[in-house]
Amino acid sequence: MCLVNPCLLLSWPPRGECCGVLCHDLPPPPSHSQATHLLPSAAETSSLEKSITLHKRYLAMGWPSSSKYQKLTDEMASQLAVPGPAKLEAVKKLMSKLDANLETQTLAVNELVAYLEQLKLLGRDPRSADPIFAPNGIKTLARYAFESPQRATARGALKVLANSMLLVPNTRREFLTLGHEGTACKQLKEEGPKSWEDAFLLSRVLLLSTYAPNIDLPTLINDHDLAGAVISNLARHAEHMRENPSGPVIPMEDMAVNETLRLLFNVTHFAPLRKPLFTPAIPLIVALLWKQDINPSRPLDPPFSSLINALLNLDFEDPEVQSSLCPQSPEASDQPSRVAARLVTLLDLSLKPGIYAEGELDQLLSPLVGVLAYVEAAATEEVKQYLRATLLPTEKDREEVLGKGTSLGSRVLKLSNNPMTPKLGDVASHLLYSLSDKDASKFVANVGFGYASGFLAKNNIPTPGNMAETSDELAARPFNPVTGQFLDSERVVELPEMTEDEKLREAERLYDLFERLKRTGIIDVQNPVEEAIRSGRFQEMDENRVTEVDSD
């Protein structure tokens, strides 16, 4: 495997750990500058009960998707979402009704859904919505989310709960003190594969829980089968893709798979000792690499970034993994290098000019190059040969100094030495070293000593003895071991002959440099000018000039 775990080179939290979008969110609440003329009047505040009653009627009549329903929802949101006493009073009334119903069980499902929808709208902005985020508020929401026999009610409560955990981090700790995380794992396994929305909401709640200091991931994995829940949901996504290879995009399905992948990444990051239990997810994630076409203008947008990140923490050393990474099916679409080629395509498109800014590359491409290194280490010899032919500099690249060309191999080589992308450079160097069979001589021959020297020194790998002989042995055309360029392609730079005065000035400059170095005491160096004078190769003419004596 690589000498370094590419995951450690990622900044934390990973890109996209939480999309920051509220569940089924509406446009953001009005700004402070808008608040003055949007504050609800006393009459509007007192009409809350009427609004909720109308809301319930629309739900009962099956109008949730109608324009009337949307207009009513927007009106209520604009009236009540502005922070202030009116909003706070509305939140208190809603929470009071929900609390009371836990004991009396008098509200119908449509009524509960209406109240929870209102609460979701009011909770988009934590200001003047304290009862939602208070311990008792989280407790009430969690009971509806995980104890309600009606999925519509549970789903409505999950939306408010997930938004609360996203907006106010302290609610994550509070949620875990209630002990519902085990139920969340169970529901993710049982309900997630049935409903994309349930899969998204339950994955979001569990994902946010992983950031709480009191999370007990080993218990969730061992006792509540969190690994099985994640794998069953990924299996459902892979099955859906096989059944509908050219079907329309389902936004909620995309959101669900991204959230499940983020949950997988976090869990394997925070509980690395349990990652072997998630190894069965590798073939499913690999299959989902073909979930949709790659967007050439943004190749690493979800789901690809989430798929790559999820693979990063998994165990590629498991012998059973190789069959999914290097499929041996006789079908043309399942050639052994198919997976590697998909990853290479993502890398190639991501490195094209103008796709991503240089400042984005470290964070975006480090996981992708790291996964390529894992695939190379676990691959068959046929796939390794494909990766060498694709990612190492070609003979055409050697017509000039390596790293100057435009091939993918040249672009990867430039990444390895780019001071603006230190993490990516380190991972790229490890990949190139692995592609060279982890042989220092082959590595120098493949990339040139100029690119290889820093990596070898940093990793305490001995430098090859005679690099010139190595280059002659490994290539039909001899090449410069430092630059990697073919010797017969090097341009000879003809410098004008130095005048006598220029030679003397250069000799004086060298003499001064050697004397300074000698005075440092760091090394004992013999000044070549002094040595020449002592040996009789120079005679003093005067105090300013010397002339060389012909030793013959």
Image (cartoon, rainbow, N blue to C red):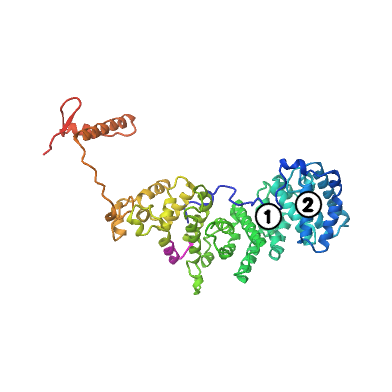
Which numbered disc flags the more N-terminal residue, 2 or 1? Answer: 2
Which of the two residues, 211 or 304, is positioned nearer the viewer here? 304
- Residue under numbered circle 1: 204
- Residue under numbered circle 2: 75
435 to 35, vertically: above or below: below
207 to 149, vertically: above or below: above
Q: Residue furthest front?
A: 37
> Which label lies toward us, 2 or 1?
2
Q: Is-magenta flag for residue 102?
A: no
The amino acid type, in three-letter code, at marker 1 is Arg
The amino acid type, in three-letter code, at marker 2 is Glu
Q: Position of residue 3 (x, y in %)?
A: 46, 52
Which of the two residues, 434 or 523, is positioned nearer the viewer here? 434
**What's the magenta region?**
378-387
Q: Residue furthest left?
A: 552
Q: Residue furthest top?
A: 543
